[in-house]
Amino acid sequence: DAASLTTEVRAWQKALWKFATIGHIGRTGGPTRWLEPVTPIQSIREFSIALTDPGNGKDLSVCLAAGTAGDGNSGDHVLWKNPRLRMAGQPDIPLRDVASLQERLD
């Protein structure tokens, strides 16, 4: 089906290429070509999420996950560097210490 194939190609073009301003090509600090490749893979990604009490005595779960980007898992590596809980005005709590902290609080 041509329409679905066109949609798929356009999605990949947007993810892997960007259009440069033609009038800036060749200028100092400007693009070298009209269509420039983009590398969507990041070697480092920082993120944070706000945690709220689910109420009713329920536990709150957070899952850290990484996928294969659809190309299989050969050569894929993920390092969760310094995962921690942070609260304003309090010292950070490394995730490795959360279980023992919970035991002391119970």
Image: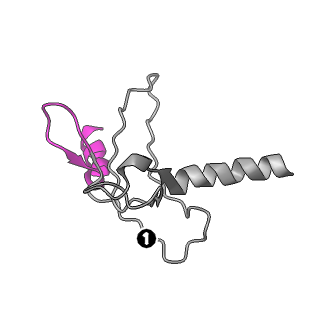
Amino acid on which the number 1 mark rests in the picture = His
Which residue is painted at 44% across and 35% down in the image? 59
Query: Residue 10: x percent and y percent?
Result: 65, 49
Residue 101: x and y in percent read 25, 45
Q: Position of residue 34 (x, y in %)?
A: 47, 55
Residue lying at 31% horizontally and 54% vertically, measured from the top left: 30
Q: How is the image coloured?
A: one colour
Residue lying farthest to the bottom in this orientation:
74
Mark 1 Cα within 10 Å, few/some/many (few <14, many 20+)? few
Q: Which residue is mark 1?
A: 77
Q: Looking at this rendering, what residue extends furthest in the right direction?
A: 1
Name the image quarter holding residue 81: bottom left
Q: Quadrant of residue 12?
A: bottom right
The residue shown at (36%, 63%) is 43
Query: In front: 43, or 103?
Result: 43
Q: How many marks?
A: 1
Left or right: residue 16 versus residue 101 is right
Image quarter where the C terminus lies is top left
Instruction: Identify the residue shown where x is 22% and y is 46%.
Output: 93
Name the secondary structure under disc 1. loop
Is 73 covered by the magenta stretch?
A: no
> Where 79 sits versus 91, above or below?
below
Measured as percent of width and height from the top left, residue 39 is found at 45, 61
Is 90 covered by the magenta stretch? yes
Q: Where does the magenta region start and end?
A: 85-106
Image quadrant assignment for residue 32: bottom left
Camera-side residue of 48 and 56:
48
